[in-house]
């Protein structure tokens, strides 16, 4: 009976079995998030840093020395940034009570203005709708989760070092396997292509996010907005989150301008974020990336929600590359081809890319 239910002739039984396996894997990943999150972050950091390591190696620098140089430069860069941001964040925390008091005064004036015109808007209702504490709580939780994840910084650092150190050996192994024609070797070649694609994606996203953060920082600095380094770093980090990341990054800056009661400054900040995100997101990023990532818009948004629920802020930051990997895995088996088609933005191309000899 088991053979009839889950045998090759029963497609429905196979689909049920695959779906059950997916649920089990998701549950296991949720339980093992504390272990998987540092590893995933290490893997994608290594993919991002692999490009400069290869560039130095091509110029005749020894591989191990290239790894040390890239890691040293990266650690120095982030150390300087976090020192500056740490002092800025401390200053912002000190000023926060005064900003809350000014916002409450602004709300009281707005309630009085509406009341004078016969519009019944309670001050308590406006305070609830425009409560800065909710925004601050969200960012504190987000930064806190990132901090908890970075508490494993030594584990992440050593994992990145080992991945980069073994990258040359891994490439040589795959080069040897590509000379053979067995099905297993073909799959290894496909996995290598997947890693190359993910590495290229992470490299481009890091460059695009860095450009976005620098432009936001420079624009706010020229406008005289306080804490421009903090807002620039926030724009850099949240730009990795698809669809809504850029909008979330603008919220605290706009709230600060609203509290300052400077309409001209508020409009300029809105214009800055719109121009930067439209130019970078719609023109520069597609040129650098060479087109779409192969995922539908709904899949990109849904992946952000799903991976955020599964792995927290790290899952949101890595939602697109993780979904690309899931789509690749789904393409390798006819029973999971439906998932790859749902995730793809080109159903016909996805179906044609499926491996015809994939094992059932």
Image: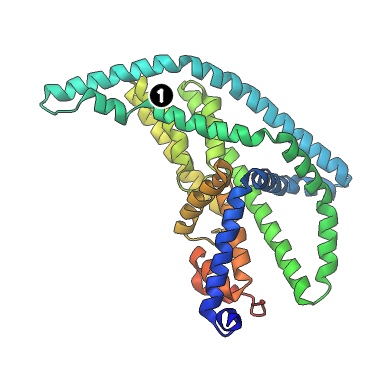
Quadrant of the image containing the C terminus: bottom right
Residue at 56% over, 58% down = 293
* Residue 176, horizontal then vertical, whole percent: 85, 67
Residue at 57% over, 56% down = 26
- Residue under label 1, please give it: 256
How many numbered circles are shown?
Answer: 1
* Residue 240, horizontal then vertical, whole percent: 55, 44
- Colour scheme shown: rainbow
Residue at 55% over, 22% down = 89
Snapshot quadrant of residue 232: top right
Q: Can residue 229 be seen in this snapshot?
A: yes
In the rendered image, the residue lying farthest to the left is: 118
Q: Nearer the viewer, residue 199 or 59?
A: 199
Quadrant of the image containing the N terminus: bottom right
Task: Tell me the crowding category of disc 1: few under 14, some 14 to 19, or many 20 or more residues within 10 angstroms, Cα based.
Answer: some
Element at badge 1?
helix
As drawn, 132 above or below 239: above
* Residue 153, horizontal then vertical, whole percent: 71, 35
Q: Can residue 265 be seen in this snapshot?
A: no
Snapshot quadrant of residue 328: bottom right
Residue at 53% over, 73% down = 15
């Amino acid at each position: 009976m088991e053979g009839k239910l889950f045998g090759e002739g029963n497609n429905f039984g196979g689909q049920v079995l695959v779906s059950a396996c997916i649920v089990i894997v998701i549950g296991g990943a949720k339980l093992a998030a504390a272990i998987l999150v540092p590893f995933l972050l290490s893997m994608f950091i290594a993919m991002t840093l692999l490009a400069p390591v290869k560039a130095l190696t091509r110029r005749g620098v020894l591989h191990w020395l290239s790894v040390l140089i890239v890691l040293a430069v990266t650690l120095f860069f982030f150390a300087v940034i976090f020192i500056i941001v740490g002092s800025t964040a401390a200053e912002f925390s000190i000023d926060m009570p005064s900003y809350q008091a000014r916002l409450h005064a602004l709300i009281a004036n707005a309630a009085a203005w509406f009341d004078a015109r016969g519009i019944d808007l309670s001050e308590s209702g406006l305070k609830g709708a425009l409560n800065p504490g909710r925004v601050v709580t969200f960012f504190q939780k987000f930064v806190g989760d990132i901090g908890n994840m970075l508490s494993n910084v030594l584990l992440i650092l050593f994992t990145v070092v080992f991945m980069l150190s073994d990258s040359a050996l891994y490439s040589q192994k795959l080069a040897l396997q590509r000379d053979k024609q067995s099905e297993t070797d073909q799959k290894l070649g496909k996995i290598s292509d997947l890693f190359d694609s993910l590495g290229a994606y992470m490299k481009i996203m890091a460059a695009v996010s860095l450009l976005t953060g620098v432009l936001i920082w420079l624009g706010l600095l020229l406008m005289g907005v306080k804490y421009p380094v903090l807002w620039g770093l926030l724009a850099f980090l949240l730009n990795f989150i698809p669809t809504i990341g850029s909008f979330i990054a603008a919220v605290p800056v706009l709230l600060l301008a609203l509290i300052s009661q400077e309409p001209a400054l508020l409009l300029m900040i809105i214009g800055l974020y719109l121009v930067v995100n439209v130019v970078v997101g719609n023109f520069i990023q597609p040129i650098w990336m060479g087109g779409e990532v192969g995922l539908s818009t709904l899949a990109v948004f849904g992946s952000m929600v799903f991976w955020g629920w599964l792995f927290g802020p790290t899952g949101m930051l890595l939602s697109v590359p993780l979904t690309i990997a899931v789509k690749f895995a789904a393409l390798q088996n006819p029973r999971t081809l439906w998932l790859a088609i749902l995730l793809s933005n080109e159903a016909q191309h996805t179906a044609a890319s499926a491996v015809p000899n994939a094992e059932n």
